């Protein structure tokens, strides 16, 4: 005989007297509970000030922040998908208190309310990590990565192209103005070559206005030329000026995201390093928590360190004792800055690893291995010839930092049997020595090869690089979805907060 089979009853279509509590179905150690607890402690007075009051009721910003933090932790970045989760996902339903804001409301809150406050919320979360002794804020492992923007990759504007075309246009404008002037004065200037004199749109507009007043109605040819200046050349000149204004200090920008700069992406899907519009986020990490982030529009990491660390100091009202970074940040300007701030620089410089190799140390032709007489200030080449000081020169960086370089020159390299091995340039060999940078390199080399330096060097690849790997590979954050520097900062801030919360739950 078969046993009597009993199935559990289904209550989906029945009313129950005591409905089950959603909270009972969420484990005590679930990330959603941590987010609920963390956000309840955040100071939201600046966000609350944005609400004017009156009219219909609003969704509470604390609830909105909770669902945004949790959605980014779950790798859900679309507002439509967040709206769907608020109806279908048990954890979203519990976290929102059964509230169901639509995707427009979520997008408005994210783009408008949080835009100015994301860095403040991020800093508050990091301060909590500090209070829990998960980070000390005494050391920063700094690194950057390039992330593609949401802009169309084919809508680029290049500084070189704009300046070249603007110069051609100025030449045409000057030629037309010369022709008009010659017609007025009845003086032949057709055979003179027109020079591209710099002229701005305001100056051109004033000249056109003056010409319109002074030219008689009978002069049809001149009227035609003035019309060409006004209808064709003036708008084009204004367009070029507008491009240059948007470029600022950059060499390129995208028309569909004017804050994005074209830079070479290493992790292109074709694996061939294509040039795409993007941003250069910089992060500081400690114990693989992100302690600070900043978004930059330059591809070069060297010029990002100073503003990045200045902002860290401004946010937390303190300086880190140590900064650890790779060779991309090793410049005289950065070493000078770190020394002025009394920060210990565990920052590599170019050729740091090469210098440790026997091949480098045994090469007699390298400037580092030439004999130097400090009393009489001269170098001696491998053939025993003196290289005397010729001059001192200054170099100015993009940020305006001035480096002093001393130039030494050999007296006569002609016919030297070692010339081919020594150098391949024309004339006599020259050396350019930056003594300040040389001194910094010696100090940094000593730090990096110390016991503590070796520990920092072993930790650096598993600190910021592991975090970028988590964001870009595990969380599929390879491209920004929002446009503009401010919104990109907001988006990366939400990603950084979600990363720290994920790390806390782990």
Image (cartoon, rainbow, N blue to C red):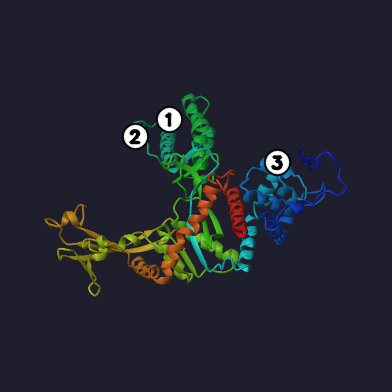
Q: Quadrant of the C terminus?
A: bottom right
Q: Can residue 51 be seen from the camera position used here?
A: no
Q: Nearer the viewer, residue 420 or 141?
A: 141
Separation of marks 3 and 1 at Cα, in angstroms: 72 Å
Q: Can residue 483 be seen from the camera position used here?
A: yes
Q: Secondary structure at mark 1?
A: helix
Judging by the rendered image, the residue that carries numbered circle 3 is 84
| x and y percentages locating residue 337 in the rendered image | 45, 66
Residue at the right extreme of this rendering: 17
Judging by the rendered image, the residue that carries numbered circle 1 is 183
Q: Secondary structure at mark 2?
A: loop
Label 1, residues with CA under 10 Å away: few <14, some 14-19, many ≥20: some
Mark 2 or 3, nearer chain start:
3
* Foreground label between 3 and 1: 3
Q: Quadrant of residue 357?
A: bottom left
Q: Is residue 256 left or right of residue 33?
A: left
Mark 3 or 1, nearer chain start:
3
Q: Which mark is residue 192?
A: 2
Q: Are marks 2 and 3 in contact (CB under 8 Å)?
A: no
Q: Are marks 2 and 1 in contact (CB under 8 Å)?
A: no
Label 2, residues with CA under 10 Å away: few <14, some 14-19, many ≥20: few
Separation of marks 2 and 1 at Cα, in angstroms: 14 Å
The residue positioned 41% from the left and 36% from the top of the image is 168
Q: Quadrant of the N terminus?
A: top right
Q: Quadrant of residue 505?
A: bottom right
Separation of marks 2 and 3 at Cα, in angstroms: 72 Å
């Amino acid at each position: 005989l078969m046993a009597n089979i009993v199935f559990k009853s289904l209550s989906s279509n029945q009313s129950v007297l005591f409905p089950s509590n959603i909270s009972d179905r969420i484990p005590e150690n679930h990330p959603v509970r941590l987010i609920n607890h963390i956000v309840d402690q955040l100071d939201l007075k600046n966000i609350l000030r944005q609400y004017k009051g009156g009219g219909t009721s609003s969704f509470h910003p604390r609830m909105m922040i909770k669902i945004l933090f949790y959605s980014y932790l779950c790798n859900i970045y679309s507002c439509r998908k967040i709206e769907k989760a608020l109806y279908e996902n048990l954890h979203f339903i519990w976290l929102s208190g059964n509230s169901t804001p639509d995707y427009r409301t979520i997008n408005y809150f994210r783009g408008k309310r949080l835009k100015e406050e994301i860095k403040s919320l991020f800093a508050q979360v990091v301060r909590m990590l500090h209070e829990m002794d998960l980070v000390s804020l005494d050391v920063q492992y700094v690194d950057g990565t390039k992330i593609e923007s949401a802009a169309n990759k084919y809508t680029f504007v290049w500084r070189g192209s704009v300046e070249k075309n603007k110069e051609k246009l100025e030449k045409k404008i000057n030629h037309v103005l010369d022709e008009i002037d010659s017609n007025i004065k009845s003086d032949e200037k057709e055979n003179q070559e027109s020079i591209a004199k710099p002229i701005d749109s305001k100056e051109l507009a004033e000249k056109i206005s003056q010409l319109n007043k002074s030219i008689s109605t009978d002069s049809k040819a001149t009227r035609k030329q003035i019309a060409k200046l006004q209808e064709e050349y003036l708008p084009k000149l204004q367009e070029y000026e507008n491009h240059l204004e948007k470029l600022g200090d950059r060499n390129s920008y995208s028309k569909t995201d004017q804050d994005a700069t074209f830079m070479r992406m290493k992790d292109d899907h074709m694996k061939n390093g294509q040039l795409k519009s993007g941003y250069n986020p910089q992060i500081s990490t400690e114990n693989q928590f992100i302690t600070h982030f900043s978004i930059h529009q330059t591809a070069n990491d060297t010029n990002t360190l100073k503003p990045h660390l200045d902002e860290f100091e401004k946010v937390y009202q303190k300086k880190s004792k140590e900064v650890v970074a790779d060779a991309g940040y090793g410049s005289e300007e950065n070493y000078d800055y770190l020394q002025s701030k009394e920060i210990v620089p565990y920052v590599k410089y170019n050729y740091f690893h090469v210098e440790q190799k026997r091949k480098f140390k045994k090469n007699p032709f390298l400037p580092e291995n030439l004999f130097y007489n400090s009393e009489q200030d001269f170098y001696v080449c491998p053939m025993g010839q003196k290289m005397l000081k010729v001059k001192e020169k200054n170099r100015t960086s993009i940020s305006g930092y001035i480096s002093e370089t001393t130039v030494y020159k050999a007296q006569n390299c002609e016919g030297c049997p070692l010339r081919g091995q020594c150098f391949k340039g024309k004339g006599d060999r020259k050396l350019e020595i930056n003594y300040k940078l040389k001194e910094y390199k010696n100090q940094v080399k000593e730090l990096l090869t110390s016991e503590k330096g070796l520990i920092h060097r072993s930790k650096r690849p598993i600190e910021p690089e592991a975090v970028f790997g988590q964001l870009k590979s595990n969380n599929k954050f390879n491209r920004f979805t929002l446009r503009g520097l401010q919104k990109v900062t907001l988006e990366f801030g939400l990603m950084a907060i979600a990363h720290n919360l994920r790390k806390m739950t782990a």
